[in-house]
Amino acid sequence: MISFEEITKIYDDGRMAVSGLSFEIQKGEFFVLIGPSGCGKTTVLKMINRLIEASGGRIMIEGRPVDDYKLNELRWNIGYVLQQIALFPHMSIAENVAVVPELMKIPRAESDKRVEHLLSMVGLDPDVYRDKRPAELSGGQQQRVGVVRALAADPDILLMDEPFSALDPVTREKLQNDLLELQRNIRKTIVFVTHDMREALKLGDRICIMKDGEVVQIGTPNDIVHRPADDFVREFLGDAAGREGFGASALTAEDLADPLAPDSRLVADGAVTVRADTALGELLWHFAVEERLLVRRGDEVIGLLDRDKTLRRMAREFQEGGAAE
């Protein structure tokens, strides 16, 4: 879907932001870019929609170089969500969401229908929020509007640059869960920048860890936790994957889950989901706020994790020494 071929970015002052990046992001994948400040992750994100132009190499979308697209064609197909969402204060919520559809000359009736659908998808009742102004919304609600505004043109790609970092921990956790549920329904290609390893482990199908403008490791959360490429990755992980004993465990969500019928009420209610290969340490962070988790493999829900039952099993595993081997 998106491929980077020997991408380099050198700024006018001679500073090299990224050097020789080559990797692919698959269609429908939730791909997380992470690393310390100044590592080049936001530069990589902005080169996808040409807010920053590459100095060398080639970026391809669906096999076509991004330079071959007209800018409006490229950017209408790429939603963009920032940390500071910058809603237009004089416009209603509905008008904010409909900005790009109007530029694309989508008929008003279709645009209105799309706005109502998107607001409903993120838990904002259109009848309540459609005519409000941004100042009347909380920070978390404004961020939801920012996400649906980026989706209003039905883009194939969604770029998200630390969208939740300015929010309080409770709101941030809720929006992370909402985003996972939204992605389960819409299956967009999401490229997400964060500096928070816990957030990366929770959200990403794959994680790209960067340092000094280069890729250090790309892998699934399970790969990163259990097979870190070097000491830098180990140090960057810190305690994000759980304390030492838990992080070393090979148990995954699928190992611990109980079978669940596809027509379960929990599935219908949209309970929080985790991937089948989610590592034990990451599950502990989920259980800090959730009593039950659904386990999915791809788009299929395959099991249920109950917090109390799972913790009891983990305690038995550690007492018997099996989980620490």
Image (tube, rainbow, N blue to C red):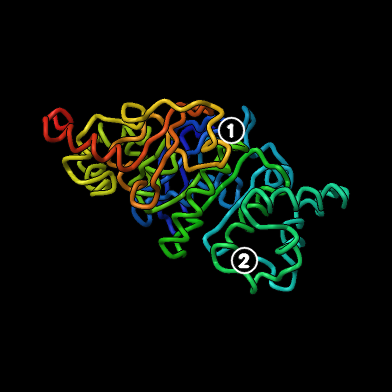
Q: Kindly identify the residue that appears in the image at 37 percent across and 42 percent down.
A: 201
Residue 37 appears in which quarter of the rendering? bottom left
Query: Percent position (x, y) of residue 245?
Result: 16, 40
Q: Which mark is residue 60?
A: 1
Query: Percent position (x, y) of residue 52?
Result: 56, 51
Q: Kindly identify the residue that appears in the image at 47 percent across and 52 percent down.
A: 42
**Amino acid, disc 1:** Met
- The one nearer the camera, 266 or 254, is 266
Badge 1 marks a residue whose secondary structure is strand
Q: Quadrant location of the N terminus?
A: top right
Query: Contact, CB < 8 Å: mark 1 with mark 2?
Result: no
Callout 1 environment at 10 Å: few (<14), some (14 to 19), or many (20+)? Answer: some
Callout 2 environment at 10 Å: few (<14), some (14 to 19), or many (20+)? Answer: few
Q: Which mark is residue 296?
A: none
Q: Quadrant location of the C terminus?
A: top left
Query: Percent position (x, y) of residue 40?
Result: 42, 50
Q: Left or right of 298: which side holds 200?
A: left
186 versus 93 height, above or below: above
Q: Which mark is residue 86?
A: 2
Distance between mark 1 and mark 2 Cα atoms:
29 Å
- The one nearer the camera, 309 or 125, is 309
- The one nearer the camera, 282 or 12, is 282
59 versus 128 height, above or below: above
Closer to the chain start, of discs 1 and 2, is 1
Query: Percent position (x, y) of residue 208?
Result: 39, 39
- The one nearer the camera, 29 or 295, is 295
